[in-house]
Amino acid sequence: MTVSVRFSRVIIRALFLIFGSFILYVLQTGLFSSFSLAGVVPDLLMILVVSVGFMRGRTKAMIAGLLCGFYIDCCYSSVMGIFPLLYIIVGNLAGFSHKIYDDDDHMTPLLLTAAGEFFYNIMYFVVFYLLQGKTNLSFYIYRIMIPRVVYTVLVSIILYRILKYTNLFLLRFDKEEV
Amino acid sequence: MKPKIKNKVRKKIVINPKIVFWGLTVFCVILIFVSYKFSDTFSSVKNVIGSVVAPMQKGINDLGDYLEEKVDHFSDMDELIEENKALKAQIDDLKNTNQILNQEKYELSYYRELYELDGLYDQYKKVAAKVISKDPNSYSGEFIIDKGESDGILKDMNVLAGNGLVGIVTQTGSNWARVRSIIDDSSKVSGMFLKTSDTCIVTGDLELIDKGYINVSQISLNAQIYDNYEVVTSYISDKYLPGILIGYVSDIGVDPTKLSQQCRLTPVVDFEHIDAVLIIIQLREQYDGISEVFKSDN
């Protein structure tokens, strides 16, 4: 395998990741805000980060997290860097599960998504509510966190399959190139 | 044989995820501080990316509206029949209310005349815009609209929906702008009771808006206010144009410090189903010289 083939592979994967996460971001802020349940939208970017972590390991999940956070930063944050940091932490933790990765395992990513979303929301609460002197955690949990986790998990049942087949397609593509 | 060995060696050179993690973490933390310190330089980066995203989001949003409409078509027949019954009952109710409101309208126009607000809204030049995306972190009162600097929209312009105040433009790109609504936790609007001219501060609260309210505080103890009084934007605000309706008050009481009164306010705008807004193409500074007097005082 020459260096150029190796390089082109990296480029293809990177393009898939960049466009994939971009499409999910646009869907999350645009399409799903018309389909919000109980005032919350599912966190598609979280599903992406966790799935990449489960399928490809820690490093790639962190890169995906950096990208996803960067999109949110660009449009919805006055200070840059907070959202990438949150997604990177989640990606890093989710990446540990790569050791038990199995093609037919559809349950683990759901649990991981739920855990990741829960963690993300807690961190979001600490950064954007607690530091502003808002301490009503129970309201936040019942009204935002739980609906959001449930909705995200429901969507991830479908989205994880799409991501998995994309991943398998990329892997097969690699083999053909060799 | 040689290249094979080379390959094996190359494959083993993998950066330790731990190092990647700490590297990225440090990068993000530095980015937080740098972007806080030099926010002007970073806003141009955001502008470029926002301009690319905005048209796509507009398309996706239209698709979403279309799908939502289709899904609504399939809602249950029973539900519709039941709703119809309820609505018929409501019509009678509303007819009654309408009559009362019509009477109050005369009263309102009288008060507007008193405050020289008559027809003030109509004088402002407005631009209509569509909401194309909402904050991905479900509970924040910010959204993005599909008009920007190219349509004459600038930072700090007031945003309306129907005849009520929605919020203020906080950031603009060439074809998009970010709006912070008055229900957002970080929003503070200087308001005034239309009937008594007492000033107050209208503070956004995402927790209370769940029940349909936001907070009003710092009302003078001497103010003679009652439920259902209108609150409009005040003359002393340096960002909001005066006389824009915010909402109606209720639950009036003395605040814990016993130095002022506080109450709740029901906004006239339905923030959950906001999809089209009007932006007033006039900044407060252009409105009159009042704001400059206040600025020089500070």
Image: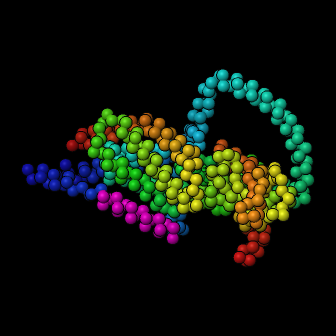
Q: Main secondary structure of the magenta part?
A: helix
Image quarter hosting the C terminus of chain B: bottom right
Say which residue appears at 70% left-offset and 55% top-offset.
B215
Q: Is residue A157 left or right of residue A13?
A: right
Near-viewer residue (A72 or B97): B97
Say which residue appears at 71% left-offset and 61% top-offset.
B256
Q: Is residue B178 left or right of residue B278?
A: left
Near-viewer residue (B56 or B163): B163
Q: Is residue B141 left or right of residue B232?
A: left
Image location (x, y in percent) of residue A149: 49, 43
Q: Is residue A39 above or below residue B151?
A: above
Image location (x, y in percent) of residue A66: 41, 55
Q: Is residue B220 left or right of residue A94?
A: right
Say which residue appears at 70% left-offset and 24% top-offset.
B82
Say which residue appears at 47% left-offset and 68% top-offset.
B33
Residue A146 seen from this side: yes
The boundaries of the magenta stretch are B18-37
Q: Is residue A71 magenta?
A: no
